[in-house]
Image (spheres, grey):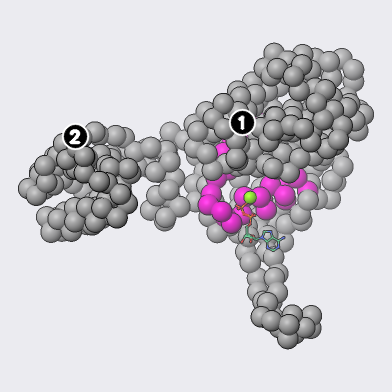
């Protein structure tokens, strides 16, 4: 496979002022040498191949946007090397811009008061897109999105979802080799999320565009990404195909129990107490308390069981000693809980 983006031991440090409080403090800050260093990105290496859709995941503040800003040339790495389509992004910003498209969720790059078609035409000129390529692209867009409804609408009159859709279309207009989507579905409703996933999927497929996607929505990941990269505190935690993620936690299953009689008031306080009681019951039964963890959702008690350490039946038997079980389900661990476990340092 042909690689298109290459990161070698990339780090980014920010120097930030330690602020002091009050008016005196702000005056002090003016002269302060009291800095602290934030390692926003810490020794990340990865190779991204042509045509891949990579989910770039991690909790808030993990360093995702900073990495993207370095790959797009907005920021210079503190150390390490980046090549995007053979170009060092921050050194050749305009050359790099020809090769990439960028969408930062909730920050539009479109001209606010112009009908969106005018924005598209300006972008066509900026990137010197030949007429035929432009028309072909518009035709492809029309086959996925109801363009008639959008093209003549000024961006300021659009819903957030329509605007995001247009921002994504704008990012693909010059048929770039790579498109970066930073939280594109944030704040959107289910239908618009589905539309955006379809759009990205189709464009990736038709144009073999490489897509780097950051998102907190596991629906986006499931719909689009074969490979995911997870970072936290600037460090790489995981880089592999998504099915390997579940393999890592193949021994886990979730037992979902209804332990409440119908009509019981299951407010959060009640459920919390119930979960605590179940947890102490299980802790008495099992010496290895790392074999399970508890949570609650609505009126259900959920027990995540590590089957390499104990069995579902044993857990059920233990619970039954004290509780009547009104209903039960068994569920394989979801991608979302796997990722949550990784965030919590479960690997
Ligand atoms: N311009 C900046 N100046 C100082 N610190 C920054 C700057 N940009 C980001 N950071 C810090 O770097 C870390 C990573 O931020 P970011 O890349 O935005 O994370 P993410 O996109 O994963 O939420 C955070 O601790 C953030 O506060
Ligand atoms: Mg971010």
Decide which of 112, 7 is in the foreground and name it: 112
The image quarter in which residue 225 lies: top right
User: Is residue 52 one of those drawn in magenta?
Assistant: yes
Note whether 48 is above or below 117 in the view shown: below
Which of disc 1 and disc 2 is earlier in sequence? 1
Q: Left or right of 2: which side holds 127?
A: right
Which residues, given as a range, are shown in magenta?
Answer: 49-73
- The residue lying toward the viewer, choosing from 152 and 286, is 152
Identify the residue under disc 1: 52
Which quadrant holds residue 179? Answer: top right
User: Where residue 84 appears, x then y in whole percent?
Assistant: 74, 41
Residue 212: x %, y % from top left: 64, 38
Identify the residue at horizontal 84%, vertical 50% (top origin). 91
State the residue at coordinates (40%, 49%): 341
Pointer 1 residue Cβ closer than 8 Å to ligand 1: no
Q: Residue at image x 80%, y 26%?
A: 153
Residue 2 seen in the current view: no
Ligand 1 lies under 8 Å from the Cβ of mark 2: no
Q: Which mark is residue 327?
A: 2
Residue 323 tag number? none
For label 2, the crowd category at 10 Å Cα-Cα, with few meaning under 14, some 14 to 19 and many 20 or more, is: few
* Disc 2, SS: strand
User: Which of 278/33 is in front?
Assistant: 278
């Amino acid at each position: 496979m042909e690689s298109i983006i290459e990161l070698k031991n990339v780090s980014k440090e920010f120097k930030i002022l330690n602020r002091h409080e009050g008016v005196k403090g702000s005056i002090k800050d003016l002269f302060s040498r009291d800095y602290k260093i934030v390692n926003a990105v810490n020794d990340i290496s990865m190779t991204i191949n042509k045509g891949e859709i990579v989910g770039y995941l991690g909790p808030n503040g993990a360093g995702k946007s900073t990495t993207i800003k370095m790959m797009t040339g907005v920021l210079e790495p503190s150390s390490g090397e980046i090549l995007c389509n053979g170009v060092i992004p921050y050194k050749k910003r305009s050359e790099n811009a020809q090769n990439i498209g960028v969408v930062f969720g909730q920050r539009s790059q479109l001209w606010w008061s112009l009908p969106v078609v005018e924005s598209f035409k300006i972008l066509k000129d900026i990137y010197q897109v030949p007429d035929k390529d432009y028309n072909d692209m518009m035709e492809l867009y029309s086959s996925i999105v109801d363009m008639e409804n959008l093209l003549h609408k000024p961006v300021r009159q659009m819903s957030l979802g329509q605007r995001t859709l247009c921002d994504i279309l704008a990012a693909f207009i010059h048929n770039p080799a790579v498109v970066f989507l930073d939280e594109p579905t944030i704040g959107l409703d289910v239908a618009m999320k589905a539309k955006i996933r379809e759009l990205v999927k189709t464009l990736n497929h038709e144009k073999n565009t490489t897509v780097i996607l950051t998102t907190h929505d596991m629906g986006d990941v499931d719909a689009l990404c074969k490979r995911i990269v997870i970072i936290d505190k600037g460090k790489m935690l995981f880089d592999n195909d998504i099915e390997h993620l579940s393999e890592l936690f193949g021994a886990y299953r979730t037992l979902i129990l209804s332990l409440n009689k119908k009509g019981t008031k299951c407010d959060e306080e009640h459920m919390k107490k119930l979960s605590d009681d179940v947890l102490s019951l299980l802790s008495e039964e099992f010496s290895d308390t790392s074999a399970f963890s508890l949570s609650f959702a609505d009126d259900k008690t959920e027990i995540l069981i590590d089957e390499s350490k104990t069995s579902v039946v044993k857990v059920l038997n233990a619970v039954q000693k004290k509780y009547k079980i009104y209903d039960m389900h068994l569920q394989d661990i979801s991608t979302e809980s796997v990722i949550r476990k990784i965030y919590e340092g479960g690997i």
